[in-house]
Image (cartoon, rainbow, N blue to C red):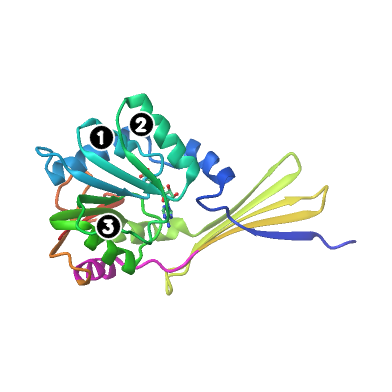
Amino acid sequence: MTPMKRIRTPMHRYGEADFDRDYLRWGFHDADTQLKEAESILRLAGNERRLRILDLACGMGRHAVYWAGQGHTVTAVDLSETFVAEGRRLMRQAGVAIEFIVSDIRSLPYREAFDVVTWIENSFFDEDMIRQVNQCLVIGGILVLDVRNPENAKARFRQSNWRTWREEAGVFYLERHETDERTGSHEDVWITIDSQHEVIEEKINTTARVPTLEERIHSMKTAGFSTVELRTMEGLLHTGGTEPYWLWLVGTK
Ligand SMILES: C[S@@+](CC[C@H](N)C(=O)[O-])C[C@H]1O[C@@H](n2cnc3c(N)ncnc32)[C@H](O)[C@@H]1O
């Protein structure tokens, strides 16, 4: 018997047109949730004056469109041309103006130019970037970014390590999702076995260790934020517990 051919490929990533076009259909929070997020951030920042808002990793820019509609000046940055093109379409549809920029947010050219910086559903946390974000803000300005509630993650830990398989029309689909508790790194593996063509295709997505909540707060304080608070999406101070899943870190410069 000839051995099966194995093809190992990394998961596709943001910025790759095929992946992004697909992601537009399933990847983002739904429109209602994003509207609530956008409203809540305005309440935190104070909606009574015209704000200069920088939306980092803006995706398709639903938050940005809402803020611009409320009369604020918005700059929205994302590395994906596909997402930004969709954002521009939504902007025109809403009849508002937003400065959309296709760029990597790890290098920010601004100095004391914004009252609010948002980084919603961030896919990585970069200490150097937090320093740059602090420089973007005026004194008294705020950074809002989200983080998974670590207590929620602990409670779900067992469920997040799982393996399964299913068969459809003679093709086997196997999945493995595992977090290494010691290092915090995470691996997702999708394997397809097509018995007819004798091919095993493995798609792998490995995430490096993510910083803890305490490390994030420490980085924000070191970067120059005078206060860092943990809040719910409704804007309430979070005092502990396993709910909700997402929390917001709000840093004030
Ligand atoms: C989960 S989506 C969230 C998008 C948006 N903030 C929202 O809440 O709908 C993550 C976004 O980060 C963007 N992104 C990831 N790495 C980036 C980078 N280095 N520079 C700019 N954008 C980045 C992706 O293109 C994607 O739009």
Determine the residue positioned at 37% across, 42% down.
Answer: 100
Residue type indicated by callout 1: Ala
Residue type indicated by callout 3: Tyr
Residue bearing mark 2:
91
Separation (CA) of disc 3 from disc 2: 23 Å
- Whether residue 239 appears in this view of the structure is no
Q: Quadrant of residue 46?
A: top left
Numbered circle sitting on residue 110? 3
Determine the residue positioned at 49% across, 60% down.
Answer: 161
State if disc 3 and disc 1 touch (CB < 8 Å).
Answer: no
At mark 2, the secondary structure is helix
- Which residue is nearer to you in this view: 117 or 159? 117
Determine the residue positioned at 49% across, 36% down.
Answer: 25
Q: In the rendered image, which quarter contains the N terminus?
A: bottom right
At mark 1, the secondary structure is helix
- Whether residue 235 appears in this view of the structure is yes
Separation (CA) of disc 2 from disc 1: 9 Å
Q: x, y (%) of residue 52?
A: 20, 45
Q: In the rendered image, which quarter contains the C terminus?
A: bottom left
- In this view, the mark in front (3 or 2): 3
Which comes before the other along the chain, label 3 or label 2? 2
- Which residue is nearer to you in this view: 104 or 229? 104
Q: Which residues are magenta?
A: 207-221
Residue bearing mark 1:
68
